[in-house]
Image (cartoon, rainbow, N blue to C red):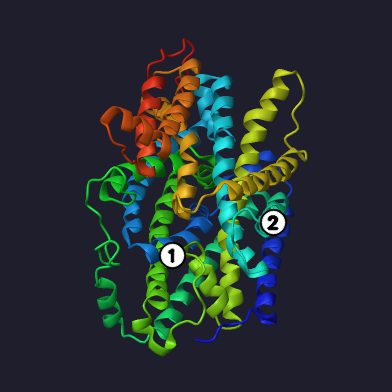
Amino acid sequence: MPLAVFGVLDWAIVAAYLALMAGIGAWAARRKTDAAGYFLAERQMPTWAVALSVVATSLSVATFNGAPQEAFTGDLTYLSLNIGGFLAVLVVATLFIPRFYAAGTLTIYGYIDQRYGETARIAVSCMFLIGRLLASGARLFIAAIPLCLLLFHTFEPKTSQLVAAIILIGAIGTGYTIAGGIRAVIWTDAVQIVIVAGTAVLSVLLLLHWIPLSVGDLLRVLREPVSNSGHSKLRLLDTSWSSGGEYTLWTALIGATFLNTAAYGVDHDLAQRMLTARSAWRGGLSLLAAQCVSVCVVGLFLCVGLLLYVFYRRPDVMGTGAPMDQLRSTMAVYPQFLLAHMPTGLAGLAIAGMFAAAQGSLDSAINAMASSAVSDLYWPIRKNLGLSVDETGATPRIAVAITGAVLIAFAIISALRYDPSQKSLLNFALGVMSFAYTGMLGVFLTALLTRRGNTASVLLALLTGVIVTTLLQDGIYQRWTNLLFGHPHTLATFWWMPIGTVAAFGVCVAGRPAVNFNTRS
């Protein structure tokens, strides 16, 4: 099969997409508003737009690149994690969101202030900022891989070309986020997820056209056991009990439930979106709708990975239609296909989809971190110093600009420290945030479910989450289990969350409630 060329038409389509994003940012910036409007859009966003924005943020480019990689090298068990996703959104929609709306604060960490005081709020907010910088830095690094492949025909970590790609994507996302705030983020996200899903549909249709098999014969090929695993490529549930299994039924029911509860409930990056809806009920409805859409989109990208497996790894099936290009790495299997085989014009749409996936998680992270830095840290510090706070000034936009610059720096660090031999792209992105999530979720569950806890126990719980998660890291966990049991054990990333959260919750709930317990919570 001849290789495609990324031509003038393709570049024009990518440029049109970037111009559209800039236009939406400029349109959103026309409305003059205070900090609450800039960060929460006056709580007037439509439910469907909020839902699409949540999907765009939660999937990110890690799914765009990582899900096809998972299906290409493995099977469909990654999709089973959505079992925990649905359980988590039910918990967050009924328990978390109503309390956050009742608190009436600019960020969800204002609720912690009402329960445990300003010091606890600052500590939880700092934990969020550090964790989100690390996790979003990893996402931005992953997002730069296809762009680096497009611009420089290389995608290896620790290269100046990858650093340049990181800076370019980060600067574009920061630019339109500065202009329009959360309103620009939500509307651009809504457009971006449509482009992302369209790219997946287009890829599936083209691969089905190029693979010389009927759908029935294709399914028969995919049902054949793969030599390195003994399982079919269509395996959906892994019911084995293995502490090192990443996508088993048990990690889906337990680990993924904890992880998604933290992602939707205590991470302001996603929780902020629900606070822009017109009511708590609409915020919860948007989250449930987002989870339904996410399952469909993830399923599409997994289908892409299965078809790419046949396309690249089964020359006996492809025959004379086998691709002429040598697959460079499974880490970039989907970007390489898009760049090498998409027809002129369609390639531009596909690359626009990659940009959309990259910026869908980047812009929201920048806005959420800026809102937390301003309302949870900067303004309280100014008030304590006896200085005035101007909620109608340029502070929010300045915070967004600074946050964007710092996030780009963390993405470069992620590119330098990533080891592809240790973790897949998805596991790398999912594992980073666990250091912050475990302690934060333990604190929020204590606040929501009990009348226990105080400032000291909140601080200790956050520290406990970090320590426990560190002890569960692969190398450390294997060393101390080897000392205890005589041989090393492995532990899947998804078990970090339930173990760390339970430990942090135990520490936080042990604290006696403060005398001035706020009964409004």
Q: Nearer the viewer, residue 419 or 35?
A: 419
For residue 422, above or below residue 2: above
- Gap in Å between the C-alphas at discs 2 and 1? 26 Å
Q: Where does label 1 land, which residue?
A: 68
Return the x and y of residue 234 as percentages of the image width and height. 28, 67
Asked whether, in this view, residue 241 is left or right of residue 114, the answer is: left
What residue type is disc 1 on? Pro
Asked whether, in this view, residue 239 is left or right of residue 247, the answer is: left
Q: Where does label 2 land, which residue?
A: 160
What residue is shown at x 46% (from left), y 10% (from top)?
A: 515
**Tag nearer the camera, 2 or 1:** 2
Q: Nearer the viewer, residue 198 or 62?
A: 62
What residue is shown at x 46% (from left), y 47% (from top)?
A: 430
Q: Farthest residue to the front: give it.
A: 486
Query: Where residue 262 is drawn, which disc sits there?
Result: none
Q: Say which label, 2 or 1, has the lower sequence index.
A: 1
Q: Farthest residue to the top: give it.
A: 515
What residue is shown at x 43% (from left), y 39% (from top)?
A: 262
Asked whether, in this view, residue 359 is left or right of residue 16, the answer is: left
What residue is shown at x 44% (from left), y 20% (from top)?
A: 519
Return the x and y of residue 291 as percentages of the image width and height. 40, 54
